[in-house]
């Protein structure tokens, strides 16, 4: 099976396609880093939309989502953005946990696995 690497970087790719599966690396905010959970989540989900499109997929084909929040008390704030974005008839499996992220100005990280 072929492997396609999308936007390879120094340590990881934005996404990797293996067969009919798309693995989108954990995405964090760039433009809104330091901003609210709402702002960061909106930016991250837009980045995921872009990565999935580059891989020939979209959010209706997401199978699994992992979400990391630096403060679990912001769960409802993140979910408000998620609920407006996610395809209601194509809900993925999902896990959300509280964790420290790579930089103190990051509040949210989201990774997804999708079908192509």
Image: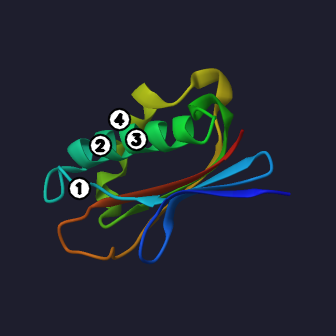
**Label ID, residue 45:** 3
Residue 45 locus on image (x, y percent): 40, 41
Mark 2 crowdedness (10 Å alpha carbons): few <14, some 14-19, many ≥20: some
Mark nearer the N terminus (2 vs 4): 2
Q: Earlier in the sequence, mark 2 or mark 1?
A: 1
Q: CA distance from mark 1 to mark 3?
A: 12 Å
- Residue nearest the observer in this picture, 54 or 47: 54
Where residue 96 appears, as percent x and y from the top left, is: 50, 58
The reply to whether dot 2 and dot 4 touch (C-beta < 8 Å) is: no
Secondary structure beneath dot 2 equals: helix
Please provide percent x and percent y for residue 22: 66, 50
N-terminal of the pair, mark 4 or mark 1, is 1
Residue 43 disc label: 2
Question: Closer to the camera: disc 4 or disc 1?
Answer: 1
| CB within 8 Å, label 3 to label 4 | yes
Above or below, 46 against 89 in this view is: below
Residue visible at 39% across and 43% down in the picture: 47
Marks 4/1: CA distance? 17 Å
Asked if the residue at tag 3 contacts the one at tag 2, i.e. Cβ–Cβ closer than 8 Å, the answer is: yes
Residue 85: name its quadrant. top left
Query: Which quarter of the image is occupied by the N terminus?
Result: bottom right
> Which dot, 3 or 4, sits closer to the camera?
3
> 69 or 62: which is nearer to us?
62
Q: Give SS at disc 4.
A: helix
Which mark is in front, 2 or 4?
2
Secondary-structure class at tag 1: loop
Q: Tell me: 58 left or right of 99.
A: right
Q: Which residue is mark 4?
A: 81
| Badge 3 density bin: few <14, some 14–19, many ≥20, Cα 10 Å | many
């Amino acid at each position: 099976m072929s492997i396609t690497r999308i936007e390879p970087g120094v340590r990881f790719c934005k996404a990797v396609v293996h067969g009919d599966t798309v693995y989108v690396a954990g995405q964090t905010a760039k433009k809104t880093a330091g901003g609210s959970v709402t702002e960061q989540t909106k930016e991250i989900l837009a980045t995921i939309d872009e990565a999935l499109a580059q891989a020939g997929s979209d959010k209706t084909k997401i199978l699994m989502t992992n979400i990391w929040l630096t403060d679990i008390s912001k769960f409802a704030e993140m979910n408000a953005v998620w609920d407006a974005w996610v395809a209601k008839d194509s809900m993925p499996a999902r896990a959300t946990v509280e964790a420290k992220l790579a930089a103190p100005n990051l509040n949210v990280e989201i990774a997804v696995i999708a079908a192509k």
